[in-house]
Amino acid sequence: NAGVTQTPKFQVLKTGQSMTLQCAQDMNHEYMSWYRQDPGMGLRLIHYSVGAGITDQGEVPNGYNVSRSTTEDFPLRLLSAAPSQTSVYFCSTGSDTDTQYFGPGTRLTVL
Amino acid sequence: KNEVEQSPQNLTAQEGEFITINCSYSVGISALHWLQQHPGGGIVSLFMLSSGKKKHGRLIATINIQEKHSSLHITASHPRDSAVYICAVKNPGNYQLIWGAGTKLIIKP
């Protein structure tokens, strides 16, 4: 039981490049979400999903896309990376009555 | 005004001291979460509360629904408790969490 896995752990991109951050969970949770955490700040919700085929925007969705084709996977796509997207990204899962589980995070630097 | 307020923002204490971190919220909730994040580390869920009190080892979490207030206590604090402690609340019928800004705790040996 791996819980929540994220790949990669670290990534450096050049401005304008695109990439996908992977998130997978093996707990059969309906709810998955992506957050970014900037230095000295709290978590900000980017996108979330309440089940396969259903996604919605959070607080800071611009520049990011998501999809949820399966219960297990919830990838986050950066369409054209910008230095403002330099951050640590966390994926999380949970159910309505359960605790929240977080992946280990992806540290992204955009040059 | 933020919907979830934590206090204090920063707390430094000596090893062995009893620690209290507070969380007040202004919205209706179905549950409140306390989470821990070590420097450069991941985020770990400590407690999920909808009423009363929970205890796990040296950590105790309480919630007063009428007063819209929760506290996280650490007994016999230790340097390894140094971390950021985050309070988050969940709206009824909604999976999303509303996050506090966190309390940075440093325990000195």
Image (cartoon, grey):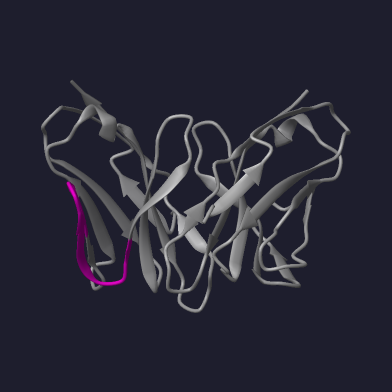
Task: Please identify the quarter of the rendering in which residue A20 is found.
Answer: top right
The quarter of the rendered structure image containing the C terminus of chain B is top left
Farthest residue to the bottom: give it.
Answer: B93
By secondary structure, the bulk of the magenta-drawn segment is best described as strand
| Vertical order, B35 against B95 (above or below) | above
* Left or right: B27, with B77 as reference point: right
* Left or right: A56, with B93 as reference point: right
* Left or right: A25, with B65 as reference point: right
* Left or right: A110, with A23 as reference point: right
Q: Which of B71 and B67 is in front in this view?
A: B71
Residue A73, x across and y down, in percent: 70, 59
**Magenta segment, which residues?**
B48-61
The quarter of the rendered structure image containing the N terminus of chain B is bottom left
Task: Please identify the quarter of the rendering in which residue B2 is found.
Answer: bottom left
Q: Is residue A104 visible?
A: yes
Q: Which residue does the image show at 66% across and 63% down from the upper left?
A: A72
Q: Nearer the viewer, residue A83 or B44?
A: B44
Q: Is residue A39 magenta?
A: no
Farthest residue to the front: give it.
Answer: A1
| Vertical order, A67 against B81 (above or below) | below
Q: Which residue does the image show at 77% across and 67% down from the upper left?
A: A69
